Image (cartoon, grey):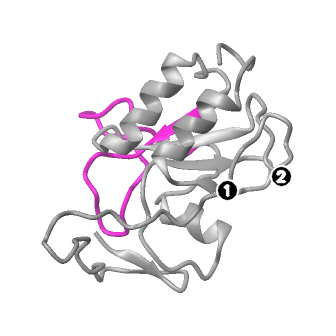
């Protein structure tokens, strides 16, 4: 799939994510900031402030979409869905007759998700993954760990839209 190395896309692969016994062991996500209801973290839960980059074929991204719908936050948190086939330079935003729900990125105009990562940290090295939660106010990635994103949607967006 490729990775970013010091802010530049590389087609090299990361080492296999396995433990000593060969079992899959997912590496930690890189962006781990937290949205809070009161904004004490520097990221306040506000309607229209956040954007979620997803792909329907990723189970981790899919669960954030399910949770966003369950909490009725569709009007508060916008999304861009990447095309399901990972291409050169990773996740690609665009249109396809086969996948009409996939669209270009209308928030930032990114063609590839890795552009969001380098906009946040121009020297970023690592994987580029969905889901990615973007702050439209500070123009940076807040978090790319699905379990933390759904916890924020559950606890910090109370009273926003249906949350």
Residue assigned mark 2: 42
Give me the residue at 31% from left, 68% from top. Answer: 88
9 or 57, nearer to the observer: 57
8 or 37, nearer to the observer: 37
Ranked by sequence position, the earlier of labels 2 and 1 is 1
| Residue 105: in magenta span | yes
| Residue 33's disc number | 1
Secondary structure of the residue carrying tag 2 is loop
Q: Which quadrant of the figure has residue 25?
A: bottom left
Magenta segment, which residues?
78-106
| Residue 101: in magenta span | yes
Secondary structure of the residue carrying tag 1 is loop
**In the image, farthest residue toward the left:** 22
| Image position, residue 136 (x, y; %) | 73, 46
160 shown above or below 106 = above
150 or 120, nearer to the observer: 150
């Amino acid at each position: 799939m490729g990775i970013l190395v010091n802010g530049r896309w590389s087609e090299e692969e990361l080492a296999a994510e396995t433990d000593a016994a060969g079992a899959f062991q997912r590496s930690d996500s890189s962006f781990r900031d937290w949205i809070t209801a009161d904004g004490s973290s520097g990221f306040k839960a506000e309607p229209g402030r956040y954007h979620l980059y997803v792909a329907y074929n990723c189970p981790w991204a899919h669960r954030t979409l399910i949770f966003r719908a369950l909490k009725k936050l569709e009007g508060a948190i916008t999304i861009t869905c990447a095309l399901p086939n990972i291409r050169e330079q990773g996740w690609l935003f665009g249109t396809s007759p086969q996948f009409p729900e996939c669209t270009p990125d209308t928030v930032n105009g990114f063609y590839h998700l890795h552009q969001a990562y380098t906009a946040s940290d121009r020297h970023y090295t690592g994987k580029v993954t969905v889901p990615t939660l973007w702050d439209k106010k500070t123009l940076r990635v807040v978090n790319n760990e699905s379990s933390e994103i759904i916890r924020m949607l559950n606890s910090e967006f109370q009273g926003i839209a249906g949350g």
